[in-house]
Each structure stands twice: as C-alpha cells, then as structure tokens.
Amino acid sequence: MKNRLSNIVIGIKGAGEMASAIAWRLYMANLKSIYMMEVREPLAVRRHVAFSEAVYCGTQTVEGVEAIKTDNIDGIKDIWKNEKIALVIDPEWQTQNKLRPDVMVDAILAKRNLGTKTTEADLVIGLGPGFVAGRDVHMVIETNRGHHLGRIMTSGEADPNTGIPGTIGGYASERVLRAPKDGVFRAQKEIGELVSAGELIGTVDRATVTAQLDGVLRGLIRPDTTVQKGLKLGDIDPRGRVEYCATISDKARAIAGSVLEAVLRVYHSG
C-alpha cells in the first residue's frame, strides 16, 4: 500500500540547479521528506540556486528554502523534523539502501543513465536523455527547450542531447564559458557582476577565459577548481538582470512542475 502523499520519502540524485528546483518545488507543495545525494566536489555553475553549495558550506538557501548537509540517517530525520531539506555526500547512492524512498528522481543530467533502475522506488523519474521510460525508469521528463519542455513520458525517451545551450536573449553557445584547457580555474569575477564582451572572467592556469557578450554573470563554478578542457565554467545572461542570478530559471521551474505532476499522478488519492 502506498504511503499518504504528505508522508512520502523522496530521494534526489544530484543537487545542482535542476535538482534543486525540483526539491524546492516539492518542498513548497508540502512534500518535505526530501534527501539529496551529491558527489564530493560538485561542479554547479548556478551556485546561488543550487543546494549542492551545502557540500562546501554546510547549508544553502534557495528562494527561502534551506538544505542542510548531514552524513547519516539520523541526521536526515532530524533535518526533516526541522522542516529542512537534507543533503548527503553519497556519490554511490548508498543512502537509498538504508532509507528506502517512495520516489527517486535522477536529476544528475549526465545525458546517460549512470545506473538508475526502476527497482529503486515505487516511482522512479529520469530527467532528459539517457533513460527509457518503462525500462530504466517509470517516467522520463523532457529537458530540451522548446514545445515539449517538461513533457512526461511513460514510454520511450527524451530528445537526444543537442550539445547546444538554450537560447536566451538571442544567444546560445556564446553565453557559455568553457575551460580552454585542463588545469585550475581562477576567477576574476563573481556571480552577479555585469561584464562586457572581451572582459576577463578568469584563467585556467595561464589560459584566459573571456566573455563573448555583454550581460550579467549568472553562474560560475567555484574558484580554484580543477577542470578539464571543455568543462562549463560559467553562464552569461545577456538580459543583464542581476536578480535572475538568485532565482530559479523558467526552464528549471517547468521541469520541477512536471516532476511534481508525476508524483501526484501516482500518489494523489483523487
């Protein structure tokens, strides 16, 4: 027998921008028994709206909702008693063996399935390409911008990875800052700063990373991070709205809403 909706336990793989929007949406819908599993050194770009920052800081608040890091099951339950989201460093997803969830969401966005199976929970949801609904997971959520963004699939799979960032303000690939080589990233700017085309954002060893357009630095990975060539380092928003840096994006809200709908499809008694 399925648990009552308000009592269900939800596990989320990842705690980056998209995973955090999902956790936030579920929490705001009063589904508050949420735990998130992250790697030891997350590489989130939009750090101001990513609960993964709790890995480094112990706590992180996104739009008024707080996540707290812990390292054991008792800690998770104590965090829930205080109506917070729990975050654990658990790259191998061992927590789900000890705290059997009712819902599991794979929000890693690896563009491939890293091992998620339908046996992990009564409802298992996968985001984006790499999952086949009805085989790997119960439901797949489309993450590709466009007409089908947020579509819930109970069979088949999402659009393949295009490798092209979504267009904002008429710009796509130009928005994204990438590592020019392997090395250590050193930042010269911070999230929320207005930058101009050609301006220095940082360096990877001695190689420079410069803005390709005018806008606000909406996201940037943590300084002094070891990176590989081609890794996404940052995101420039040509709309120049500084307040967007600390709020969930339209795409993330759409996908998060679809995850909430998927949960309600299975657990809402109505």
Image: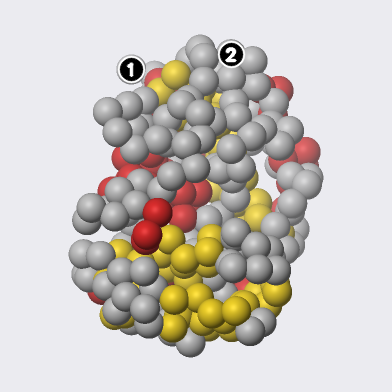
Which percent across, then down, holds residue 53?
55, 69
Q: Which mark is residue 167?
A: none
Q: Measure the C-alpha gap from mark 1 to mark 2.
A: 24 Å
Up-down relation of residue 6 to residue 15 (above or below)? above
In the rendered view, how is the structure colored?
Answer: secondary structure
Residue 62 falls in image quadrant? bottom left
Up-down relation of residue 108 to residue 81 (above or below)? above
Which percent across, then down, holds residue 263?
44, 29
Query: Which residue is outermost to the bottom?
Result: 188
Q: Residue at x 36, y 78 (%)?
A: 198
Secondary structure, mark 2, is loop
Which percent across, then down, holds residue 6?
44, 37
Q: Amino acid at mark 2?
A: Gly
Q: Residue at x 27, y 28 (%)?
A: 147
The residue wearing badge 1 is 270
Q: Residue at x 60, y 59 (%)?
A: 230
The residue wearing badge 2 is 134
Is the residue marked by circle 2 packed among few (<14), some (14-19), or many (20+) residues within 10 Å? some
Q: In the rendered image, is residue 213 in sight?
A: yes
Q: In the rendered image, is residue 103 in sight?
A: no
Secondary structure, mark 1, is loop
Q: Quadrant of the C terminus?
A: top left
Pointer 1 with pointer 2, Cβ within 8 A = no
Which percent across, then down, holds residue 142?
42, 30
Up-down relation of residue 260 to residue 208 (above or below)? above
| Number of marks in picture | 2
Q: Amino acid at mark 1?
A: Gly
Is the residue marked by circle 1 packed among few (<14), some (14-19), or many (20+) residues within 10 Å? few
